[in-house]
Structure formats: C-alpha cells, structure tokens
Amino acid sequence: MQSECWNVCDTCRRLHVSQVLIVEPERSRVVLTAKRTLLDTDQPILTSYEDAKVGMVTHGVIFTVSEKMLRVEFFNNVKAIIPAREARFV
C-alpha cells in the first residue's frame, strides 16, 4: 500500500535522497535537507562548534538576512553570523 504522500504531490516522490540537518528530541523534531549543494559536496560538514576552524570553507543555509548581518545554519543546529559588511553577494 502506498503512503498517502504519494497521492499528495510529485515532490514527495522525488524526495528520496535527504540528509538529517537537525535533531531536536526535546521537541520530537527531525529536520531533513534535500538541497543538492549540501548533499553533493566535497566540503567538510560542520556539525559542532568544536569542528569549526579558522579559514574553514563549507556549505550552509542562510536563514536570516538583515541590514547588519546574515545568519547561517549548518548541520546539527550549528549557527553562525556573517557581518553584512563582510558578505560578498554574487
């Protein structure tokens, strides 16, 4: 028997490749990502603040943009701030 999701949208059928982005057991929540950039990367995956190194280059997701800063999220709820004056927009 097919899941109800199969009848809802074509996106559900294509969402067969994903990676866990965040786990929040206290909220009974797991967040997955299907972003190609995060799945098909040769960059290191940042999953803890201890793993972050000066000069490290990796992929993240911008989740807030303001006049003063960009807020970026990595795996496992690791977050960072980029001052807007240092951001390079392409």
Image (cartoon, rainbow, N blue to C red):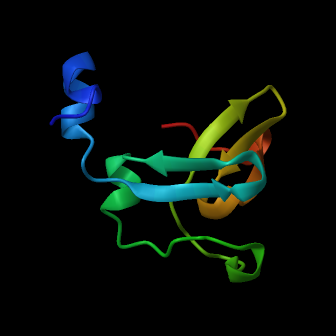
Q: Residue 25, position in %: x, y? A: 71, 57
In the rendered image, the vertical position of residue 28 relative to residue 38, given as above or below: above
Please tell me which residue is depicted at 56% across the width and 46% down the height of the picture: 61
Please tell me which residue is depicted at 35% across the width and 59% down the height of the picture: 39
Q: Residue 29, position in %: x, y? A: 64, 47
Please tell me which residue is depicted at 59% across the width and 61% down the height of the picture: 75
In front of the other: 11 or 72: 11
Q: Residue 88, position in %: x, y? A: 60, 43
Q: Quadrant of residue 40?
A: bottom left
Q: Residue 43, position in %: x, y? A: 43, 72
Please tell me which residue is depicted at 56% across the width and 53% down the height of the picture: 60
Q: Is residue 34 left or right of residue 69?
A: left
In front of the other: 53 or 76: 76
Q: Residue furthest left?
A: 1
Q: Quadrant of residue 11?
A: top left
In the rendered image, the vertical position of residue 54 relative to residue 89, given as above or below: below
Q: Is residue 25 left or right of residue 34?
A: right
Q: Residue furthest right?
A: 68
